[in-house]
Image (cartoon, helix red, strand yellow):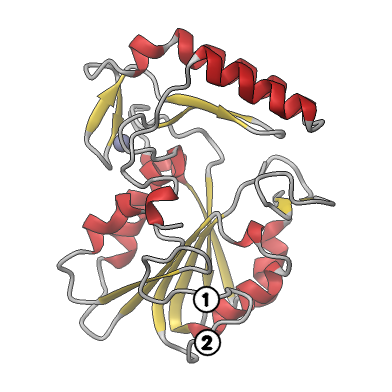
Amino acid sequence: MNTLDNPGSFTPYHLKSIRMITSSVLSKFKSGEFIKAFNFLVTESLNSWNKKKILNKKGKYYCPLCENHSGSFIHMSNSFRYSFNSVCPYCSSRARHRGLLFLYKKEISGLDTESRVLHFAPEPVFYSIFKNKSFRYQTTDYILEDVDLPKQDVQNLSIADDMYDRILSNHVIEHVQDDIKALSEMYRITKKGGKVIITVPGNFKRARTVYFENLKNNGHYRDYGIDFIKKLEKVFNKVEIIDLNSFDTTGELAIPKRELVFIGIKL
Ligand SMILES: [Zn+2]
């Protein structure tokens, strides 16, 4: 696998044919994933219905990552939730990526030649903002092969202490068994005064994290609740929360409310 298989890879997101939708729904039903099958049927039917609108380049929504307009982004779902109006058909960015672009630009603006940024499971849609900058930008992952530091298990990194000024991690730690260990490792390799900028899948109106007994939910060990903050506070000296919706002042980015980013700071 490589970074082109990641969400936000610049690979266009192909709308599914009726035949593909039917066969996918049936296979989910056969494996007992009834809610997932039903949600998938709803979102993919709406996407088929909306095809013209989605591909309308004069539409009211805008993706700042690939600079295309659309009449609607693509709807997605899983066993837990619907993400309506989320995926850009041209670069496959999700709502979180469209907001993170602005946050990342802000967070790297003060970095200098001595600074280092490490990006876990990197999304190619962000590469352009790190190009030709004075600081050192590196990518890493456990599975993806086309990264600077491959085969790195975030629960046990072979990276020295106090190395990075910024660590970027989107939808990574839900895939590992011990997320506290992963956060502790990120803390360890962060310089004093550095920040770890994290997004995780979840429902932040819900108080508690839901833990899964198997990895059928996209290989996730858990779906986070707002109690994720307690885990961060155990590891980091200071924690900040930013709602990416705050970057969408006109609504054209289609970033929902409570699309949260968690920033762990090492003092
Ligand atoms: Zn896009």
Q: Secondary structure at mark 1?
A: loop
Q: Secondary structure at mark 2?
A: loop
Between residue 190 and residue 80, name the one nearer to us.
Answer: 80
Residue that badge 2 annotates: 158
On whether ligand 1 comes within 8 Å of the CB at mark 2, the answer is: no
On screen, 124 above or below 139? above
In this rendering, does residue 28 appear at all? yes
**Furthest residue in direction right, as rendered:** 213
The residue at the point 74 percent across, 51 percent down is 215
Residue that badge 1 annotates: 152
The image shows residue 262 at horizontal and vertical percentages of 54, 58
The image shows residue 231 at horizontal and vertical percentages of 71, 66
Instruction: Mark 1 and mark 2 in contact? Answer it, CB < 8 Å.
Output: yes
Tell how many labels.
2
The residue at the point 55 percent across, 54 percent down is 171
**Furthest residue in direction bottom, as rendered:** 160
Horizontally, residue 60 falls left or right of residue 211, namely left
